[in-house]
Image (cartoon, rainbow, N blue to C red):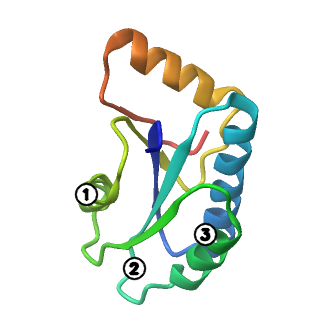
């Protein structure tokens, strides 16, 4: 079972989503935690489905694709939570630039504060 689900709420921006997934995969290698990545596609046309499946086929961690046709970050987040398989959840946007120790800090903070979820939004 993964330690944490990183839910990436994605607009149909293939390059940004690809970069976000690759950054999340690097976090695993640096911090030793076992995440799963849930990419939630907020487009009626499933524009990033093939990309996510291609990344999942090459990854050493679970990467799930979820399509949410209803336009809203709330719907996206709920769809990601429903697909998640881990006890902890962290939400990120596809345009976030996560620092190298992000996952380590998130895991430590969530465990110390007994949090179930963490949301970071804003494209920093």
In the drawing, what numbered circle is on residue 56? 3
Which one is earlier in the sequence, the residue at label 3 or at label 2?
Answer: 2
Location of residue 116 (image quadrant): top left
Q: Is residue 97 above or below residue 30?
A: below
Helix, strand or loop for disc 3: helix
Is 70 on the left-hand or right-hand side of 50? left
Residue named by callout 1: 82
In the drawing, what numbered circle is on residue 53? none
The x and y percentages for residue 40 are 41, 65
Q: Residues within 10 Å of mark 2 (few under 14, many from 20)?
A: some
- If the image is split into quadrants, where does the N terminus sit? top left
Asked if the residue at tag 1 contacts the one at tag 2, i.e. Cβ–Cβ closer than 8 Å, the answer is no
Q: In this view, does 93 lie above or below 79?
A: above
Residue named by callout 2: 43
Location of residue 42 (image quadrant): bottom left
Q: Residue at x 50, y 84 (%)?
A: 47
């Amino acid at each position: 079972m993964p330690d944490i689900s990183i839910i990436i709420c994605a607009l149909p921006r293939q390059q940004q989503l690809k970069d976000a997934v690759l950054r999340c995969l690097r976090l695993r290698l640096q911090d030793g935690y076992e995440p799963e990545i849930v990419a939630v596609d907020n487009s009626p046309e499933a524009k990033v489905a093939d990309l996510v499946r291609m990344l999942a086929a090459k990854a050493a961690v679970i990467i799930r694709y979820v399509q949410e046709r209803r336009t809203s970050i709330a719907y996206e987040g709920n769809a990601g939570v429903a697909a998640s398989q881990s006890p902890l959840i962290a939400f990120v946007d596809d345009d976030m630039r996560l620092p190298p120790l992000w996952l380590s800090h998130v895991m430590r903070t969530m465990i110390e504060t007994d949090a179930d979820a963490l949301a970071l939004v804003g494209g920093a």
